[in-house]
Image (tube, rainbow, N blue to C red):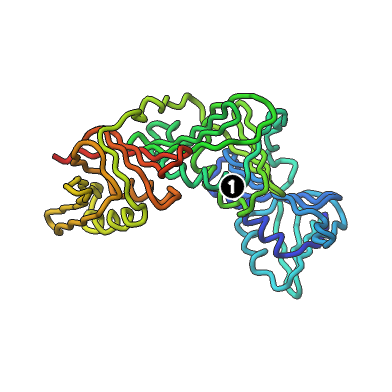
Amino acid sequence: MRFIIQRDRLVQSVQDVMKAVTSRTTIPILTGIKVVATSEGVTLTGSDSDISIESFIPKEEDGNEIAEIKQTGAIVLQAKFFSEIVKKLPTDSVEIHVENQLQTVIRSGKSEFKLNGLDAEEYPLLPQISEENVFKVPTDLLKAMIRQTVFSVSTSETRPILTGVNWKVENGELTCIATDSHRLALRKARIETENAENYNVVIPGKSLNELSKILDDNNDLVEIVITENQVLFKAKHVLFFSRLLEGNYPDTSRLIPTESKTDIVVNTKEFLQAIDRASLLAREGRNNVVKFTTIEGGIIEISSNTPEIGHVVEELQSKSVEGEELKISFSAKFMMDALKTLEGSEITISFTGAMRPFVIRPINDDSILQLILPVRTY
């Protein structure tokens, strides 16, 4: 194998596939990156058997030559060293060539590295996915949907299914739901789908976080293919495979209250800043709890009291308060996480009592909601 390639493109591809490579794998060859040169271009693959990422660098693009393939072939190179070397090479082009016994020469300008490679035949094959049932989502929408839900997944392995995001496709609509049983995030959007197949799968939160980092900010369509135990995301030159979590996701529709006793409309930014300040004295320890009380004239009092540190009180003028008076306590962190994902300058918070979950949504927007369970403080 022998080829010459633009260093920038190689660095970008190596960084993308590195997101799937881990040093803690039971299969030693997976600590490497597989490099394959064909007459079309160069393909890099990284995998930890849960996530696999394949990045393709075409021979030419828009009339510019990116890679010159002198001899096709394949090799697996130690990811840790290969990625560091490529980043620090001195010139804009890199020559990579495999000599006998899998020794690989990496040349750039006056610098030359020799790395011992591994046999590419021993690298596990990527899942073969038949692409009959594809649906498409614009990249920027996909990234937004991930950002607005993935922070709510559980970090504890006691219920592994909750470490993923539940994706449902029904009637041309994709719904993403994440919950750690103390809060819930939901986001829906219309999507392009070629057939009326319904899906209900759970994608690991970790996979979605990595996917989001790789996708460019553009509105190209990402093709998504779901099979029994894998999901594949196809972007321009990247294939991203992830295994699905096994098991049934709990039915969350019962958790979301349909009626409310108190509805409050506030300015998102002002409310977020008030919670942020109130939480300054509540950060110690796990509790991080703020109290929220409605007073007359549409004023809301947000307070926090940590006996050994001090006390803080904030007053906030709401846009409107309808319904019963309310005293409730909740985690400031959960509230701030939720508010940061909501677009729009004003939000409605609907309460159904001091110990029942409450719902936050942007005004006039049904596509997204955040739900938080209050904390018992008295």
- Work out whether residue 63 or residue 74 is closer to the camera in this orientation and state it: 63
Classify 169 as above or below 340.
Answer: above
- Work out whether residue 319 or residue 41 is closer to the camera in this orientation and state it: 319
Q: Quadrant of the C terminus?
A: top left
Identity of the amino acid at label 1?
Ala
Mark 1 crowdedness (10 Å alpha carbons): few <14, some 14-19, many ≥20? many
Judge from the rendering whether residue 176 lies leftward or rightward of residue 99; answer left or right. left
- Work out whether residue 308 or residue 102 is closer to the camera in this orientation and state it: 308
Residue lying farthest to the bottom in this orientation: 110
Query: Residue drawn at (72%, 63%), measured in percent from left and top?
Result: 114
Is residue 116 at all visible to an observer of this figure? yes
Judge from the rendering whether residue 170 lies leftward or rightward of residue 320; answer left or right. right
Classify 315 as above or below 141.
Answer: below
Query: Residue drawn at (81%, 52%), measured in percent from left and top?
Result: 41
Q: Quadrant of the N terminus?
A: bottom right
SS for dot 1: loop
Query: Residue drawn at (18%, 56%), measured in percent from left and top?
Result: 313
- The answer to which image quadrant residue 222 occupies is top right
Image location of residue 192, percent across then percent down: 65, 35
Image location of residue 117, percent across then percent down: 71, 53
Image location of residue 363, percent across then percent down: 40, 44
- Work out whether residue 85 or residue 234 is closer to the camera in this orientation and state it: 234
> Can you identify the residue that label 1 sits on?
20
Is residue 29 at all visible to an observer of this figure? no
